[in-house]
Amino acid sequence: MNKKINWDALGITASLACAIHCALLPLFFTSLPVFGVNVIENTFFEILMVAVAFILGTYALYHGYKKHHHSALPIIVFSVGFAFLILKLFFAEFEHWLLIPAVFGIISSHIINYKFCQLHNHAHTEDCNH
């Protein structure tokens, strides 16, 4: 049984999980500190989510670029979105304003990559070595 992992779908899921964590968690879990659980202002969890988004996104986009479409557009869109995500970590007072373009860019890059992969499906060029 040979199952393929859709890395773009996994990347979109990770990005959505990050967006839900950043946007909705404060609304629903404001009572967690009463029980000694601090997920809202947990720096380790925040960095972990950013690292997971980066690792999954980078792998999915590299795979799509190298094996399918050879277009840098998804990587550029991802980089811009990820730059906003990194800025969000350093400028907490603008967190919600930076989160919107970050999530939009990261998810858009995976959607673009997925569509390019479906459209080209192993399109080979002169620089291809696979």
Image: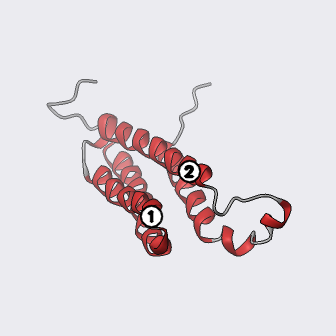
At label 1, counting other C-alpha atoms closer than 10 Å, the crowd grade (few under 14, some 14-19, many 20 or more) is some
Gap in angstroms between the C-alphas marked 1 and 2: 13 Å
Q: Position of residue 99 (x, y in %)?
A: 47, 68
Q: Nearer the viewer, residue 125 or 63?
A: 63
**Residue 38 sits in quarter:** bottom right
Q: In this orientation, which residue lies closer to the viewer: 49 or 42?
A: 42
Amino acid carrying mark 2 in the image: Met
- Above/below status of 62 relative to 104: above
- What residue do we see at 57% from left, 58% from top? 18
Question: How far across and how far down the image is residue 107, in percent?
Answer: 45, 59
| Label 1 vs 2, first from the N-terminus | 2
In the image, 20: left or right of 67? right
- Where disc 1 sits, the SS reads helix
Amino acid type at mark 1? Lys
Location of the C terminus (image quadrant)? top left
Would residue 94 appear left or right of 117 to someone viewing this image?
Answer: right
Q: Nearer the viewer, residue 107 or 93?
A: 93
In the rendered image, residue 24, in percent from the top left (x then y), is placed at 65, 71
Picture disc at residue 49: 2
x 51%, y 54%: residue: 12
State the scheme by which the image is colored.
Answer: secondary structure
Q: Residues within 10 Å of mark 2 (few under 14, many from 20)?
A: some
Position of the N terminus, as image quadrant, is: top right
Q: Position of residue 105 (x, y in %)?
A: 39, 62
Residue 88, numbered label: 1
